[in-house]
Image: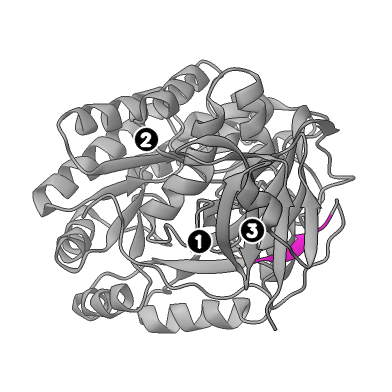
């Protein structure tokens, strides 16, 4: 049965424009937009009316970097696909792209099937997958082609974590060469893991065991060096490159230099690098463990370069790298040895609000907010214009956003399945009021009305910046 929803009176903000328009939704898609008060808009009727007067009407967020139920350091990320996608919806995100993991000795298909099993029937919002390659050989290289064809069109490799996820330069080059042929996009965790392991070993031998040494051993120059090396390998392969969770100004400089040469090189950063700093890693009583992630939080002076990179488009996307571990029982595994602290922060619920705060603070414009959080990730990973915009024919993934509401971020009130907030006590201006996922209200006037299983798996095209 056909259902129609009318969102009336709001300021529609997309990456391309801001217009005072009413939005008509029919059968899960955007049917039409018309100027508020126009004859066309006045003629519309609907089963459900949403009053957006004084509010923004924005596309649902696309978080292109999450790790639900991710295995790390002998434990698993504390959000599964049910709790994690529910929290995402609360934060105005309506699509996630999570990482399926190939285990060493197993096929890409086995890894992808395992992640489908984790997510199927659990998600409150739509989802897609990237593929982590842990074992690059002739068989997995051939498998890449089939995955691209079926909508898993991006592959993550690690220059970090020797003995676990690490790939050497030869394997990275082979995967890049394959992606140059099949249209896939290589995503790179760019840190020199071999050198980092030496620094970790030396720090522990000195008795430097506290969380702050996590940041000090993962040196900014080892992120910059790996970023540079990844770019050169991609040039040799004739392949595009997407560098994940960029945190250091030296790494931004490597991306900017490559882009100035016209190379198809892209960069992502995360809210934690924009709003938090290495100071948090030094919090007393092991509290710094809450902020252990890789790449690590950097000294505060790096933030200016990241904001500048977002304004100049040397960085194109803000994702969360949401990979939460509870402080009690999980982060505490690293008491007495920082190298055993599970790496990852919670954030899928906070991204849209923190980036709106960046608009309030003057770091970015409203349209740039939507560009880096919705439109560009959708284009980068082959989901646009189905996702990432409000336009006729697009999925009705729509957020009614109150730009004047003031909220305090806290573990007491968030919906992520983790016992602390990385942004505890931070006040931000702006809050999600109502969220539609394919036309269905999943957050309705600050109440969760969604359900596990509403979200569907969404195959992706290839990167839309390369055609």
Question: Residues at badges 3 and 1 in contact (C-beta under 8 Å)?
Answer: no
Q: Say which residue appears at 55% left-offset and 67% top-offset.
A: 127
Residue 79 in view (yes/no): no
Rendered-image quadrant of the C terminus = bottom left
Q: Residue furthest right?
A: 412
Residue 131 in the figure: left or right of residue 293:
left
Q: Using the image as rendered, state which of residue 243 and residue 452 is in the foreground.
A: 452
Q: Is residue 142 above or below residue 41?
A: below
Percent across and percent down for residue 311 are: 43, 24
Dot 2, how many residues are within 10 Å of its Cα: few (below 14), some (14-19), or many (20+)? many
Gap in angstroms between the C-alphas marked 2 and 1: 38 Å
Q: Could you tell me residue 317's position as x and y percent?
A: 45, 41
Magenta-colored span: 439-444
Q: Is residue 158 magenta?
A: no
State whether residue 445 is above or below residue 450.
above
- In primary-sequence order, the first of circles 2 and 1 is 2
Depth check, mark 2 against mark 1: the one in front is 1
Q: Mark 1 points at which residue?
A: 394
- Regarding mark 3 in the picture, which secondary structure is present there? strand
Q: Mark 3 points at which residue?
A: 24
Quadrant where the N terminus sits is: bottom right
Q: In which quarter of the image is residue 265?
A: top left
């Amino acid at each position: 049965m056909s259902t129609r929803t009318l969102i009336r009176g709001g300021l529609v903000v997309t990456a391309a424009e801001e217009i005072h328009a009413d939005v008509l939704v029919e059968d899960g898609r955007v049917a039409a937009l018309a100027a508020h008060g126009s004859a066309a808009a006045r003629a519309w009727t609907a089963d459900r009316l949403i009053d957006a007067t004084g509010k923004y009407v924005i596309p649902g967020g696309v978080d292109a970097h999450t790790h639900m139920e991710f295995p790390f350091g002998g434990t698993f990320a504390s959000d599964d696909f049910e709790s994690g996608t529910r929290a995402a919806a609360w934060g105005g995100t309506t699509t996630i792209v999570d990482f399926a993991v190939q285990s060493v000795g197993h096929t890409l298909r086995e890894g992808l099937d395992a992640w489908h099993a984790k997510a199927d029937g659990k998600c409150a919002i739509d989802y897609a997958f990237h593929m982590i390659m842990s074992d690059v050989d002739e068989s997995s290289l051939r498998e890449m082609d089939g995955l691209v064809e079926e909508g898993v069109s991006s592959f993550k490799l690690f220059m970090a974590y020797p003995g676990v996820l690490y790939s050497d330069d030869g394997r990275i080059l082979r995967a890049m060469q394959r992606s140059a042929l099949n249209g896939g996009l290589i995503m790179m965790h760019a840190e020199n893991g071999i050198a980092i392991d030496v620094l970790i070993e030396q720090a522990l031998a000195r008795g430097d065991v506290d969380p702050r040494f996590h940041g000090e051993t993962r040196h900014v120059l080892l992120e910059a060096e790996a970023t540079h090396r990844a770019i050169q390998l991609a040039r040799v392969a004739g392949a595009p490159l997407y560098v994940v969770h960029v945190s250091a100004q030296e790494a931004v400089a490597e991306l900017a230099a490559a882009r100035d040469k016209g190379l198809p090189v892209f960069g992502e950063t995360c809210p934690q690098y924009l709003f938090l700093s290495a100071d948090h890693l030094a919090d007393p009583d092991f509290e710094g463990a809450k902020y252990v992630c890789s790449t690590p939080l950097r000294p505060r002076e790096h933030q200016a370069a990241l904001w500048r990179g977002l304004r100049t488009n040397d960085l194109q996307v803000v994702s969360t790298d949401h990979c939460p571990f509870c402080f009690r029982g999980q982060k505490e595994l690293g008491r007495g040895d920082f190298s055993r602290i599970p790496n990852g922060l919670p954030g899928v619920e906070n991204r849209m609000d923190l980036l709106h705060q960046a608009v309030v603070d003057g770091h970015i414009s409203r349209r740039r907010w939507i560009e880096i959080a919705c439109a560009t990730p959708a284009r980068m990973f082959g989901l646009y214009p189905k996702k990432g915009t409000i336009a006729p024919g697009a999925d009705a993934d729509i957020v009614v956003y109150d730009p004047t509401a003031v909220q305090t971020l806290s573990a007491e009130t968030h919906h992520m399945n983790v016992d602390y907030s990385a942004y505890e006590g931070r006040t931000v201006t702006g809050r999600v009021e109502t969220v539609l996922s394919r036309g269905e209200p999943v957050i309705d006037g600050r109440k969760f009305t969604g359900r596990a299983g509403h979200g569907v798996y969404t195959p992706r095209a290839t990167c839309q910046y390369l055609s």
